[in-house]
């Protein structure tokens, strides 16, 4: 009797075929860093000094670095840590402020069926204000609240304000917040049941605006990832269930949406107190071939960075849980991204029909989704014609997807035991500040370090070198050794100290960007590491090279050629060439 191969067998065969033809090669790291090295790095555990004991887990939610100070928002507690006062194997806080939910909010939360552990104040928004001070929002037992705090003593300033549309009710829900030109832009859910997803502007001189309520063309089960300010717009990055693939089962895709910072909303008849400029487009991170292999789930983005003479943003993507496991990093040109919003619109003429491009002759004028321009006929979005506003309301999706630079990912990792989900970029790495290093965090707490090498023509494509991999989570100090405990919440680059700050639910680990001392006794290993932070100096040692150093040193970042060097006689760590 013949046996039938399981479905994933055919998927694997397909992936192997793709790998042979189009998939980038996935070599392992040049260096695996021993676990005992990482476990000596400083860790923050929520203590003021070494003799103090901590009773409850921290449950860290947000981390914010302002100059040489690190603010940590956790469950019920806010910490201030001085980054220049770290000594030994633990970081201690200089100031702590507790902000708990009151008994009535907790009672109502419990009455609504929530568990006692959920009816606490989880700090989900932690921002620095332009004039100084902090703006913080917490879930407050499923009744979100916001408040201003001083940056030095962590004292509340003024009264609390409602956190509705600024902070989620549930600590498990994703949210995004940033200040731009005095206004707070947020992306979250506005209700207890998390049904009403919103992009919201508030607290500034402009009127409060929001996205259209309960309209699947605007949002369908979104998961908000990040937001950036660029030009006259705020760009929001998220993933959601695609409405345009109505002939398939639920498909999650990644999106970028934009709104005009100075949007005043529509007319009294259409889009009043709602965005008149909201548009969205799909982000395409895929490996080309006979059939594209898509990485549809966006997890993290970089800020807008200047590379290759252009403004770009990097994103970490993965495949869905029921697919072949894989992650990828794609880069997007901001000019090209903005250009997609000047292209064709997508529409569905009836609930049963497929989505098609809107003919150019049917697009009203002025062009829908644009910003009002002072000195023109339409110097305010309130003055836009109702026909144009109606079109925006019913046609928020663009026809064209935003293609990644080079039409393919810069980094691909497939068939591995982890999912890449966090990133940070050092675009001024090395002694000459002319190298780009990308640090990627994974779902199991490990950190992957890549050197991004532009092609010789400095074109849109780049190659990469997988420099090293290390375990970032320290169970000996952070406590529980479980998949949940190892979930990396954020990854921050502290340039002055040349370290990474890895935030986990129970701790923050401080890891140097390089481990040059591991190759200190062997020039061959030092050069072969291809680490732009490391060089072989005159003292016959592998040294960390500070930016602008005047020390003479040897490096070969581009090639790592060591054929002319002798062996290390066993004086090395695990180095794979």
Image: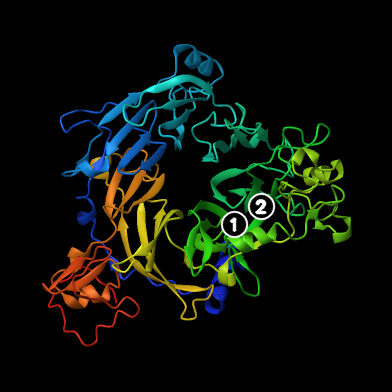
- Judged left or right of residue 371, residue 314 is left
Quarter that holds the C terminus: bottom left
Badge 1 density bin: few <14, some 14–19, many ≥20, Cα 10 Å = many
Coordinates of residue 470 in the picture (x, y in percent): 30, 58
Q: Nearer the viewer, residue 333 or 504?
A: 333
Residue 485 visible, this orientation:
no
Coordinates of residue 528 in the picture (x, y in percent): 26, 76
Q: Nearer the viewer, residue 1 or 265?
A: 265
- First in sequence: mark 1 vs mark 2: 2
The label on residue 251 is: 2
Q: Are marks 1 and 2 in contact (CB under 8 Å)?
A: yes
Q: Secondary structure at mark 1?
A: loop
- The quadrant in which residue 434 appears is bottom left
- Residue at x-position 30% and y-position 54%: 471
Badge 2 density bin: few <14, some 14–19, many ≥20, Cα 10 Å = some
Up the image or down, 257 lies above or below 548; here it is above
- Judged left or right of residue 512, residue 398 is right
Q: Which residue is mark 1?
A: 296
- The quadrant in which residue 6 appears is bottom right
- The tally of labels here is 2
Up the image or down, 289 lies above or below 170; here it is below
């Amino acid at each position: 009797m013949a046996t039938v191969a399981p479905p994933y067998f055919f998927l694997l065969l397909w992936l192997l075929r793709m790998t042979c033809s189009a998939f980038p090669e996935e070599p392992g790291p040049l260096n695996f860093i021993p676990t005992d090295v990482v476990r000596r790095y400083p860790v923050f555990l929520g203590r003021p000094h070494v003799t103090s004991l901590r009773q409850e887990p921290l449950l860290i939610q947000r981390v914010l670095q302002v100059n040489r100070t690190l603010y940590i928002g956790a469950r019920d507690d806010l910490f201030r840590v001085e980054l220049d006062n770290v000594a030994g194997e633990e970081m201690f806080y200089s100031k702590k402020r507790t902000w708990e939910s009151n008994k009535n909010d907790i009672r109502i939360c419990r009455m609504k069926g929530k568990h006692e552990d959920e009816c606490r104040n989880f700090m989900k928004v932690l921002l620095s204000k332009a004039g100084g001070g902090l703006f913080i929002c917490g879930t407050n037992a499923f009744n979100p609240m916001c408040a201003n705090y001083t940056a030095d003593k962590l004292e509340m300033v003024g009264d609390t304000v409602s956190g509705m549309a600024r902070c989620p009710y549930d600590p498990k829900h994703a949210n995004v917040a940033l200040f731009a030109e005095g206004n707070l832009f947020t992306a979250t859910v506005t209700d207890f049941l998390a049904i009403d997803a919103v992009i919201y502007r508030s607290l500034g001189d402009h009127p409060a605006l929001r996205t259209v309520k309960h309209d699947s063309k605007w949002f369908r089960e979104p998961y908000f990832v990040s937001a950036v300010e660029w030009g006259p717009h705020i760009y929001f990055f998220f993933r959601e269930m695609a409405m345009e693939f109505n002939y398939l089962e639920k498909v999650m895709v990644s999106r970028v949406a934009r709104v005009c910072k100075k949007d005043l909303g529509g007319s009294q008849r259409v889009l009043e107190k709602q965005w008149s400029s909201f548009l969205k487009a799909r982000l395409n991170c895929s490996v080309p071939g006979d059939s594209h292999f898509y990485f549809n789930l966006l997890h993290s983005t970089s800020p807008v960075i200047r590379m290759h003479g252009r403004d770009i943003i990097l994103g970490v993507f993965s495949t869905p849980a029921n697919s072949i496991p894989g992650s990828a990093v794609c880069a997007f040109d901001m000019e090209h991204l903005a250009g997609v919003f000047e292209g064709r619109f997508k529409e569905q003429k009836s609930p049963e029909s497929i989505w098609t491009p809107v003919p150019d002759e049917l697009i009203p004028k002025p062009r829908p989704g644009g910003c009002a321009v002072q000195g023109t006929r339409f110097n305010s979005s309130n003055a836009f014609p109702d026909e144009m506003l109606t079109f925006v309301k019913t046609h928020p999706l663009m026809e064209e997807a935003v293609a990644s630079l080079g039409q393919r990912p810069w980094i691909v990792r497939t068939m591995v035991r982890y999912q890449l989900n966090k990133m940070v970029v050092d675009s001024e790495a090395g002694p000459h500040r002319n190298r780009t290093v990308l640090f990627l965090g994974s779902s199991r707490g490990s950190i992957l370090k890549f050197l991004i090498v532009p092609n010789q023509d400095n074109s849109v494509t780049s190659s990469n070198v997988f420099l090293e991999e290390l375990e970032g989570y320290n169970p000996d100090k952070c406590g529980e050794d479980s998949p949940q405990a190892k979930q990396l919440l954020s990854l921050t680059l502290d340039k002055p100290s040349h370290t990474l700050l890895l935030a986990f639910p129970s701790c923050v680990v401080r890891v140097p960007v390089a481990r040059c001392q591991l190759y200190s006794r062997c020039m061959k290993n030092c050069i072969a590491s291809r680490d732009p932070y490391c060089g072989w100096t005159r003292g016959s040692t592998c040294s960390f090279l500070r930016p602008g150093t005047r020390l003479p040193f040897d490096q070969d970042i581009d090639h790592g050629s060591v054929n002319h060097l002798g062996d290390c006689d066993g004086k090395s760590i695990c180095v794979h060439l």
